[in-house]
Image (cartoon, rainbow, N blue to C red):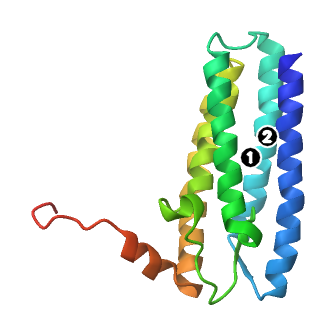
């Protein structure tokens, strides 16, 4: 019962985010946004949808129940949701599930983007571990951690290249990079 309620709420959250992404996409395209990484986008959507299908099958078939560490894992999940909301609201209308870049736009430097380049990707990676752990879905955990690593191997370079080419991304993050001591190379 807990699993069904939990998974339905997470799926509804993701569907709501897709509605926001579609609205943001329309706004960004009116601003002249260019899309990058379209060749891997459908694979990413399929991966995320398959995550839920696999999770539902594994939890249903194995009937292992909730983790003995359900409470601390759920607290971590809630913290991740707060981080997710912080990352998405910090980007505002520039947040999207696609790689869309408005040429000459200034890079967002608020919220978690003050500290790290891709906070939402880090949060998603942690969610892909925490959600299966909540319900002892170890196959889902391992499979989708590997698939997400492979996806990010394609996606992050595509996003960084687009941002560097059309925005002040390189200058902003170069200025924020910690200097490397001369004796370490």
The structure residue drawn at horizontal position 87% and vertical position 66%, both measured from the top left corner, is 22
**Considering the image in quadrants, where does the N terminus appear?**
top right
Task: Check contact, mark 2 vs mark 1: CB within 8 A.
Answer: yes
Q: Residues within 10 Å of mark 2 (few under 14, many from 20)?
A: some
Tell which of 35 and 73 is nearer to you. Answer: 73
Q: Position of residue 100 (x, y in %)?
A: 71, 75
Total count of labels: 2
In the picture of the structure, the residue carrying the numbered disc 2 is 50
Q: Is residue 175 placed above or below 121 in the rendered structure?
A: below
Any mark on residue 47, and which?
1
Q: Is residue 122 placed above or below 143 in the rendered structure?
A: below
Secondary structure of the residue carrying numbered label 1: helix
The structure residue drawn at horizontal position 73% and vertical position 68%, both measured from the top left corner, is 92
Left or right of 59? Residue 109 is left
The structure residue drawn at horizontal position 68% and vertical position 49%, both measured from the top left corner, is 84
Left or right of 121? Residue 25 is right
């Amino acid at each position: 019962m807990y699993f069904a309620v939990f998974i339905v709420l997470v799926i509804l959250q993701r569907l709501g985010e897709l509605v926001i992404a579609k609205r943001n996409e329309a706004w960004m395209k009116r601003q002249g946004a260019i899309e990058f990484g379209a060749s891997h986008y459908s694979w990413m959507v399929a991966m995320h949808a398959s995550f839920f299908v696999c999770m539902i099958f594994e939890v249903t078939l194995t009937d292992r129940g909730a983790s003995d560490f359900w409470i601390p894992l759920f607290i971590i999940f809630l913290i991740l949701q707060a981080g997710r909301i912080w990352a998405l609201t910090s980007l505002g209308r520039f947040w999207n599930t696609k790689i869309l870049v408005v040429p000459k736009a200034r890079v967002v430097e608020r919220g978690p983007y003050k500290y790290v380049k891709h906070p939402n990707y880090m949060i998603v990676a942690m969610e892909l571990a925490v959600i299966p752990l909540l319900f002892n879905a170890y196959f889902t955990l391992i499979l989708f951690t590997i698939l997400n690593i492979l996806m990010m191997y394609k996606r992050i370079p595509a996003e960084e290249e687009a941002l560097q080419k059309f925005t002040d991304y390189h200058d902003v993050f170069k200025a924020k990079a910690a200097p490397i001591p001369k004796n370490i190379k």
